[in-house]
Structure formats: structure tokens, C-alpha cells
Amino acid sequence: MKLTYCVPENKKIRVIIDSDTACEADDPFAIAHALMSPKLIVRAVIAEHFAAAGSMQKSYEAIKRLTAAMELDVNVLSGEEWPLKQTKRISEGVKFIIEEARSQNSHPLYILCLGALSNIARALEEAPDIEQRITVVSIGGRSYEDSMRDFREFNFGNDVEAVNKVLESQVPFWQIPVSAYATIQVGLAELQNKVSCCGQAGKYLYEQMVTFNRSEYASWASGESWSLGDSPAVAVTINPGCGEYKDIQSKRVNPDTSYTDNGKGRLIRVYETIDSRYVLEDFFSKLELNYKLV
């Protein structure tokens, strides 16, 4: 690390990153951001499925490729292979969440969920005693102001049962819905200029983005820009004030990912805006300081 500042020990936070890394090209940017941030003690990165056969394993392999490019020794674990109601075994990732939450450690523990909530939901199902020992930060869900629009949000939609399991618990829950996470827009030219020149790590991040952008799976994308939509989970954990939020009563998530007020909600934090300048500049600066060859 080439950062010349340090973070006081009492301000550091333990994190477990839960990521469907092989699903899209933005997850690796968020994971890299967390791994380069001295405030975050990354205890593990757990692979998440994206509701397709073999998707968890693909995510696991993608995480390993990223950490190899960054030349970091990271605890990478397998997660649940399918949504909650289809899961038949407890994965090593779920076991680790439970063990880490139960450990005697003065640093608070945050679970950064960049995809479906299957792993954390299964952990809460198996060990409800960890509810008040963790905070869940989730990228997912529709905007509450536009809940009925005909749009099935991807992350929540990949395991609606898991989302409701988490919301029905008492675990502190920070939600970053699509109306906020989709605002972290970057151009591919900007990534070529600021990322690709930063050693093997930057080269890997940029090239996997370009490869995905020209694939059949990116038919919905605009062509030369992208949203680094998973990065806000890292940013608000480092700096909770990098966006505007409000505490609202949680609602039940329907199969189409719209919301229903069932009268049983509890307070959750929902981010309405994210400071994209802060998110992107913090990432670009850390990448350059750590990996750009002089």
C-alpha cells in the first residue's frame, strides 16, 4: 500500500463481501475498492449465485481472478448455490458469516451484499442470535417513490424470499435501491484513461469490463458507459455520510419486486442519493496510489 495516511484502530470496520461477481462487470470494482481501503478489514469475500445453474461457482472463480490480479491473499469462500427455498446445504460462506458474527471482536461487522441475499438470509435462519451483531448493507430493490413501475429489480428478484427473511429479522439494514445505485455512471474512455494504466489490477478491471460490454449479456447497456452500481455499498460503509438517507418502515417485497405495506415493518435505512464524485474519486485515487507504475 502506498497510502501515506492511516486509519485509527477504533474506527476500522470488519466486512464480509457477498458478491455475484460473474454476473456483471461492476462487482470487481466494488470488491477492489474495499480491498484497497484501510478502514475496512476484509474478513472474506463470499461468492453469491445469480439464480442460474453454476452461477455461484462462476462468481467464486471470478473473485479468485480478481484477487490474483491484485496480488492479494484474500479469504474467498463458496456461498449458497441457489435461492433460499432451493438450498439443501449450509455453505462454507454461510458458516463463516455465523462464526465471524459470534467472534469476540471489538470491530463492528458489516455484510456488504452486492447481489441476492441468499447467503445472509441462510445465516440468519441458522443463527438468529447474530442479528444484533452485524449490519447488512444491500445493493438492491426498487425505488420506494416508483415502486409500481413495471420493473423487476435484479438483485432482489434473484431471491425475494431471502430479502423478506432479512427484512423480517431485526438485523440493522441499509438499503441502496436502484434509484441511488444506478447513478454511479462512468464512461469506458474514463476507465481506459484512469484504470487500465494501473498495473495488472487496473488492466484486469478494465479488460473484464470491455469484454462484458461487447458480450451478448450486455444487450441492455448503452455501448460506451456503465454504472458501477455495487460500489456505493463500499462507499457508505467507509463514509455513511456520502449520500442522503432516511429511515423508513420496511415493506414486504413481492415476487415482481414491488413493495407492499403489511403493517409489520421495522425501521431500515434507505439511501436516496449517493455522492458519485466521492465514490469514483476515492476508488480512482486508491487504485492509482496502489498500482500505477511510476
Image: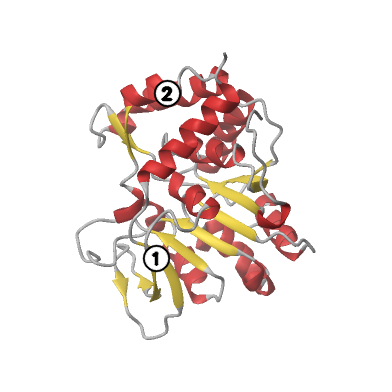
Q: Amino acid at mark 1?
A: Val
Q: Whole-percent x and y of residue 228?
A: 39, 40
Q: Which mark is residue 212?
A: none
Disc 1 to disc 2, C-alpha distance? 31 Å
* Left or right relative to 199: residue 100: right
User: To which residue does mark 2 refer?
Assistant: 194
Q: Quadrant of residue 264?
A: bottom left
Q: Work out whether 27 lies above or below 143.
A: above
User: Can see residue 30?
Assistant: yes
**Image point 42% across, 34% down: which residue?**
25
Secondary structure beneath label 1: strand
Quadrant holding the C terminus: top right
* Foreground label between 1 and 2: 2
Q: How many marks?
A: 2
Disc 1 crowd rating (10 Å Cα; few below 14, some 14-19, many 20+) is many
Q: Is residue 153 visible?
A: no
Horizontal side, residue 97 vs residue 237: left or right? right
Of 107 and 93, which appears nearest the observer?
Answer: 107
Q: Residue furthest left?
A: 149
Residue at x 38% of width, y 64% of height: 245
Dot 1 corresponds to which residue?
A: 270
- Quadrant location of residue 36? top right
